[in-house]
Amino acid sequence: MVIVALPWMILFSPLAACVLITLFFLRSRVMSAGLAIASILISFAATAAVFFQLRNNSLINAFEQSFAWIRMGPLAIDFGAILDPLSVLMLLVVTGVGSAIFIYSLGYMKDDPSFPRFFACLALFAFSMIGIVLANNFIQLFMFWELVGLSSYLLIGFWYEKPSAADAGVKAFVVNRVADFGFLCGIILLWSASDLGAGRSFLFSHLSAVVPHLDKELLHWITLLIFCGVVGKSAQVPLHVWLPDAMEGPTPVSALIHAATMVAAGIYLLCRVFFLFEAMPQALSVVAHIGAITAFLAATLAVAENDIKKILAYSTVSQLGYMVMALGLGGNIAGMYHLTTHAFFKALLFLGAGSVIYALHHKQNIWEMGGLLKSMPVTGGTFLIGTLALCGIFPLSGFWSKDEILLLAASHNTLLYWIGTFTAGLTAFYMGRVLWIAFLGEKHSSPHPVRESPAVMTFPLIFLAILSVIGGFLGIPHFLRAAEHAEFNFNVAIFSTFVAVSGLLISYLVYGKRPRHDPLEKKLGPVYLLLKNKYFFDSLYRWYVEEVQQRAAGLFYLVEKYVIVRLGIHGITWTAKGSGRILRYLQTGAVQIYALIFVLGVTYLFFRLGGMR
Amino acid sequence: MTAPLGPLSWILLWPIIGIAFIFLTPKDKISWIRWIANIMVFLSFALALEVFFSYDRTAGGYQFIDKIPWVKPLGISYHVGVDGINSVLVLLQAFCSLAGILVTRSIKERVKEYYILYLMLIIGVYGVFLSLDLFFLYFFYEMAVMPVYLLIGVWGSTDKEYATMKLTLYLTGGAVLALIALLALYAGTGLGTFDLVAIQQHLAANPLSPQLQNWIFPVIVVGFGVIVTLWPFYTWSPVGYAAAPTSVSMLHAGVLKKLGAYAILRLGIQLMPQAAQIWMPWVATLAVLNILYCGLISLTQKDMKFILGYSSCSHMGYILLGLACLNTIGLNGVVFLIFAHGIMAALGFALVGAFYDQTHTRNLDDLGGLAKRMPFVATCFTMAAMASAGLPGFANFIAEVMILLGAWDKYRWQAILAVLGIVVTAVYMLKAVRLVFHGPLPAKWTHVTDAKTIFQRLPYALLILVLLAVGFWPSLILRNIEVGTKPILEQLEHQSTGTPVHQAKR
């Protein structure tokens, strides 16, 4: 069957591109871009082939291949691939949106001297991300999980000469490492409990059979620890701090990695191992609440931000919060649904922002923009579509997926429903703010005329805009085999639309007349200060690193210097001083003599002992 | 004994021949000296590769044996051979010594003497891993330690007199303790032989009395623990590495240091499994101190080589923790990590040397932005840093995961703290990359140039290639390791249940 080779083709074609570029084409712009784009298109085509096979032949519900990677005594680690509706949908998103963004980068990165390196890193990312999606066991997933962390680090710090970019890369990697500490402990804990007579295993298929037999208390810990990994990768409170800083990377990177795919890996992980969480109401409740808090906090932070990319970054955090909340409410289908539509419209918004930044010569402050809809009609128009989709306006894709989540919340947890709905209003408000200030109103005086971006950049915008519009009609929940697909509820839909529209209207009332400064600054007073300082999360962490960790390390160093070294060495050196003096006389500096003495000594010993024969 | 010498003896002989040739070469013919040294080390390297790949895994046991009786009354003989474990360690030494001799090009003063001493160091380290006779094992060990004293004292940097004295005294002190333990073993068996194979077979059938094991074992652990920087006997190592010339740091941190772990495994755990069960839990706790304490100190350091030095002490904690597991996953993980960390450490020190030769400072505050001038070195260093931080794709990840899995059941809290150590490593390694290679390029470093020629790039590329190859395809070395650890694990299993293994396989 053809399907056997396809997953490996999907996985390894970007890796091949990355290796070839790194080894041979670091100076060739044409070859590097060509290889990278060809590789992602191959992956996309292969994914499409799998998709059609899977859809036409409804008998194949899931297809799994597995090879023994490490077999050593009681340790068995596999390397395999799962193709089921969940992974195929995710693959379509990764390679489809990825293709659009790879092509877009041709235009956006045109003038960059490190153009080939950029494409090598993008290809590395594609490989790692596809690896996460295909993984059929925890170790393989964790490996690719770390590799996307690496590619994220490399791409955030792509312009490494810039201190802020270099710092942001380190921050992203370290924050994710902290989260992965919990994740890895969770994986090992689960592994250690997975022996039901047939040995321990990391395989998802094995583990899902084991879960019903596990001690509930233990499973509780395991789920929470694994959720730690999600909190890091998907930027949930309190580890969300790395994502806004990650906007230091080139904009296509922000669109692909820090909006559409990598940050969604946490959601994908939760769906993949949902069998662990299913029967754990307490753990699910933690997940749901973390998600809701994140959705709300990040939306408020977006209100006080002026950098267009950071607004979108907070929006991403907030939307990821929605997805996590959906999963916490037991709605893995709803979560994946929102992940997909969000990938469409958030990638669109980021690429639109990138197009604007490109046209304005790297200006990112929305207060320095204006009237962009007129000067950049394609960018402006598609950005408008993306905004409306994000706000959840009927009948765009965001409406359908957000509606499913709110519906779920309404039927399970009223508090979360209200948080979700209020956040939807906030979302409409901060996106309306960007629209009124940057895209509508009159033009901002600018030394250069603002022109529409080239076709290589606008074509992906149009592609993604189409997906953002029709995303709700593609039958995604059906494809995911939604058994308990929620009935459409008119009350919830009407009310959430009402909230979104009012959010847009309020933002018009505040920003419609294009004030020079943010009027909220005065009106909100201390609250605004709180928002400007990002709820002091960063300050708290900085305080911890500088005052606690660095001091503790310094203290250790003092102990080392004054206790261990003093007691240890000086004890030895004092006794050895005598011999040291003699050695000093020998230290004439002529190395030949040392060597000679050594060799003579050895020879002497050799013959002396040899003579005893 | 007229049997022709096998490949293992030739691994030792080529560098000896090299020393002889270099002795005869006039000292101003520097390029001749270089070529002789490089070729001889390459010949040993090729033989080591051949030994590794032709080791017969189905037969197992010691192979490629050369045995020449020497001092019969004392039972000393020249006896070399490799089992699965040694074959991997010899491979490690082969790669590190080849990379090391290539990097030695940067030495400009007293070149002839340097090469002679460096070849002696290489012979010593090979010898330790090849010897199956305790006397020769000890002899080769001293042969490795003594040239280092001069290499650091004469060609070193930062505080070299203090450092070389400290390093030599510590290592000799540890060696003396180890010697006492070895002599006790020699006497304890009552066989009157230093032959390791004979001692192993004898002790497998007739274990030492628990009382005797109980005092010899900790002496071995501490004696050899000094070399593998068991907490708190590690302070010689960062100072020593910082002062040592690049190629010496590479061999020392990469290979020589691992000798302690090898000896604890081979002489401690294998010969005295009962005492190991009693004492190793203490080592597990000290191992965590290694990991976290040295890791945190690394955070405070400004000198790049001190960061790597403390980092390597920190990583030795994983090796010690793995040794303490005394189970299949843990012990195989240890040998795997010895290999992976050895290559990575050699790579790290080599790369520090690559920019230090031009900047003459390793202080993080003075450096910055070097990636602009030396992209190749920067890329390699980032890869070394990532390997050190346990990134998948590099061999270190698999080794560390194996050790964590092995330790999980027995030492739950130690294992959790060891996972935390991976976070700490990421912090200081990325900080180092950030401060040395990223950020704006200061005007004073605009003259720095990258490694450009194939010869300059070869040592780094070679080591990275090994890390990646083993990282993607672990069974490459794991198959040999498994064969090697099997008898040790059998010993552990039988002796802890009280039934001695009769007649261990040869």
Image: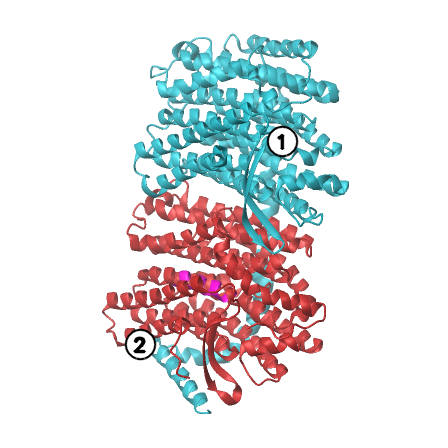
Chain colours: A cyan, B red
x 55%, y 83%: residue: B193
Q: Residue at position x 68%, y 56% from top?
A: B411
Q: Amino acid at mark 1?
A: Cys
Q: Label 1 neighbourhood size at 10 Å, few (<14), some (14-19), many (20+)?
A: many
Q: Which residue is mark 2?
A: B20
- Magenta stretch encompasses residue B94: yes
User: From what the image shows, is residue B273 above or below residue A156?
Assistant: below
Real-space CA distance between mark 2 and mark 1, rounded to the nearest whole angstrom? 67 Å
Give above or below for A121 relative to B30: above
Three-letter code for the amino acid on which mark 2 is drawn: Ala
Highlighted magenta segment, given as a residue range: B85-97
Frontmost residue, B226 versus A163: B226
Determine whether the residue tagged by mark 2 lies in a helix, strand or loop.
helix
Residue A2 pos. (x, y %): 47, 33
Q: Which residue is mark 1?
A: A271
Does the image show residue A434?
no
Q: Position of residue B304 (x, y in %)?
A: 45, 53
- Image quadrant where residue A269 sits: top right
Dominant secondary structure, magenta: helix
In this view of the protein, which residue sits in the foreground, A225 or A92? A92
